[in-house]
Image (cartoon, grey):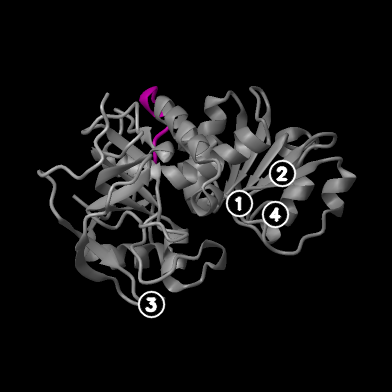
Amino acid sequence: MTAITSVPVSLPVSMRALVLDAPGQPFRDTHLPLPALRPGHVLVRVRASGVNPLDSKIRQGQAGHARQPLPAVLGLDMAGEIAALGEGVSGWQVGDPVFAMSGGVGGLQGSLAEYQLVDAALLARKPAALSFREAAALPLVTITAWEGLRDRARLAAGQRVLVHGGAGGIGHVAIQLARARGAEVAATGSAEQADVIAALGATPIDYRAERVEDYVQRLTGGAGFDVVLDTLGGATLDASFTAVRRWGGHVVSALGWGSHSLAPLSFRGGSYSGIFTLIPLQTGEGRAHHGEILAEAARLADCGLLRPRLDTQRFDLGSALAAHERVEQGRADGKVVVDVD
């Protein structure tokens, strides 16, 4: 396949994009020049942009670990179609449907725009079983859950898994990934979320009504869980250290940023791993692994083993600020997605 190194004549010279000029401000709806192709990159026609809590924190200037120099286009996740190929790109063709955690941090343009320049290593083919909206809801949460369960904890069939925040973005995907691996899954949530958690195939735990030691006894006979995935941090991470099994249990956390005593975990002979999914975007290291994870996730989706829960409310570029506010205010029931097309 011959790669092209310039923007085809059929493409526009500019694109609609939402620009954030200062933290906490509304987006500026404007037109920007089409991104120039670079070696190893592709130009993607963005069809949908996922909105994560992290996107909202970046917009508000509250994510010191995920800085995006302003003014900038935000949007970590996207799904779309390849519009042009840069020099050295192979294995892809113009028109291929793709999805990725593609930018919106570290100086990289995000997905709240009609077009986005993306490192080809980050891309995976969009699952045929999912719409662009559904695919755009998956990248960050799927990569985070995968890195925790598969890369760090080395989850195996038959193991017991506890997911904290099972109805959340990372949590609902983690349940599905663990079950696809052949694990037995329990997940914490509110009483109102029990039906959602059960429908995903996990045993619901009402964290408000049941103490850690009680559900550990009820579900594992007091032995503890082989793997505990924490998506909430704080006191929930501390609870994870007492819920893991003795002799080799593994706790993984996507929010292990506070000060915690490791004594309970050490006394159980367990281990801990942190997850920081942004490293490849911020440093350029390990980007191909993100593409590999999403390719495996796409296979699971096409087998009917992975599907995101989408919020019922629809948003487009003109209402993207309302999409962010819905996430910030905790009113979403599922992943929020902005239709860019």
**Image location (x, y in percent) of residue 303:** 39, 22
Looking at the picture, does residue 209 appear above or below residue 120?
Answer: below
**Disc 1 to disc 3, how far (Cα)?**
27 Å
Residue at 22% from the left image edge and 33% from the top image edge: 94
**Image location (x, y in percent) of residue 339:** 23, 52
Circle nearer the N terminus (4, 1): 4
**How packed is label 1: few (under 14 Cα within 10 Å), some, or many (20 or more)?**
many
Q: Which residue is mark 3?
A: 22
Q: Which residue is mark 4?
A: 237
Please give left or right for residue 59 compared with residue 163 in the image: left
Q: Which residue is mark 2?
A: 251
Label 4 with label 1: CB-CB less than 8 Å: no
Q: Which residue is mark 1?
A: 254
**Image location (x, y in percent) of residue 136:** 34, 45
Residue type pointed to by label 1: Ala
Q: Residue furthest right?
A: 267
Q: Which residues are magenta?
A: 301-308
The magenta stretch spans residue 264: no
Residue type pointed to by label 2: Val
